[in-house]
């Protein structure tokens, strides 16, 4: 793994007491965004994810978590407003169900994605509509082993999401890219695409087997 890169994992299923503690770390804007969620579990997830992001970044920046300020790209990707001029800290996060993962990297853009493997999805239909021909063939050939088929599909999806988040293009614009090389290989294999390094996350953090995650980092 890239030396400048750090990965983290946090459980979003927090207690009311922890919710109140983490709430104090949020900005007024974040609190306002949280209040717009209709359901309690979504408010809980938002507070846990954003406050823990602040805690992680505060360790990297050696500052108070509540003092961190964010700005956002046109596509809503957060980045640091007030980081020191001698540091260029890039970060990204992704959550699914009750898990959130974070990537923090010095001097390199980064994107990360996490998905719960939902066995009720028609993966062949989605792949045929959005994936490259090579990816489609791999997923179709694995139909006799559904567990492997779903794993290949979700691997393709998180790789595309991570690439889209890292590059800022959004997944809709990069679905045609071919990541077939990583769909049937062991975790840890690396693929370089247009100056970006992609890999599936395996042993770097302890993600449960019913999830799939991927990482994308700029080569320089």
Image (tube, helix red, strand yellow):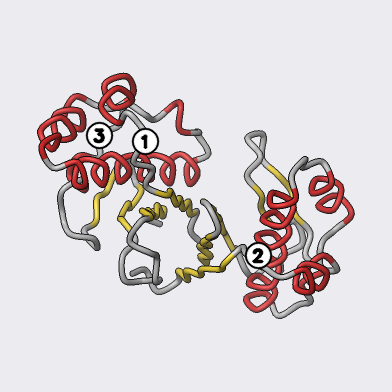
Structural distance between the alpha carbons of marks 3 and 2? 31 Å
Residue with the mark numbered 1: 120
Q: Residue 59 sits in which quadrant?
A: bottom right
Q: Is residue 210 left or right of residue 166?
A: left
Q: Is residue 190 above or below residue 163?
A: below
Q: Residue 197's spot in the image, x, y percent?
A: 33, 53
Q: Secondary structure at mark 2?
A: helix
Residue 178's mark? 3
Whether residues under marks 3 and 2 lie with C-beta atoms below 8 angstroms apart, the answer is no
Residue found 77% across the figure and 68% down from its top: 16
Q: Secondary structure at mark 1?
A: loop
In the orientation shown, which residue stands out farthest toward the right? 28
Residue neighbourhood size for the residue with mark 2, other residues' Cα within 10 Å, grouped as few (<14), some (14–19), many (≥20):
many
Q: Nearer the viewer, residue 173 or 53?
A: 53
Q: Residue 205's spot in the image, x, y percent?
A: 40, 71
Task: State the quadrant of the C terminus.
Answer: bottom left
Residue found 82% across the figure and 41% down from its top: 36
Residue 53's mark? 2
């Amino acid at each position: 793994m890239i030396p400048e890169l750090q990965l983290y994992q946090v459980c979003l299923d927090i207690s009311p007491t922890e919710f109140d503690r983490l709430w104090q770390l949020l900005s007024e804007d974040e609190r306002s965004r949280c209040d717009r969620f209709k359901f309690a579990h979504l408010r809980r997830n938002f507070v846990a994810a954003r406050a823990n992001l602040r805690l992680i970044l505060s360790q990297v920046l050696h500052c108070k978590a509540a003092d961190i300020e964010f700005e956002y790209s046109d596509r809503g990707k957060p980045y640091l407003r007030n980081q020191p001029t001698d540091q260029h800290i890039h970060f990204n996060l992704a959550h699914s169900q009750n898990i959130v993962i974070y990537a923090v990297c010095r001097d390199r853009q980064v994107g990360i994605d996490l998905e719960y493997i939902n066995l009720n999805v028609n993966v062949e239909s989605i792949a045929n509509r959005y994936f490259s021909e090579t990816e489609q063939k791999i997923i179709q050939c694995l139909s006799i082993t559904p567990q492997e088929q779903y794993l290949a599909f979700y691997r393709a999806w998180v790789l595309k999401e991570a690439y889209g988040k890292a590059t800022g293009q959004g997944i809709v614009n990069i679905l045609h890219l071919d990541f077939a090389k990583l769909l049937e290989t062991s975790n840890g294999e690396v693929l370089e695409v247009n100056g970006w390094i992609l890999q599936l996350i395996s042993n770097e953090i302890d993600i449960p087997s019913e999830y799939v995650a991927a990482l994308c980092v700029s080569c320089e």
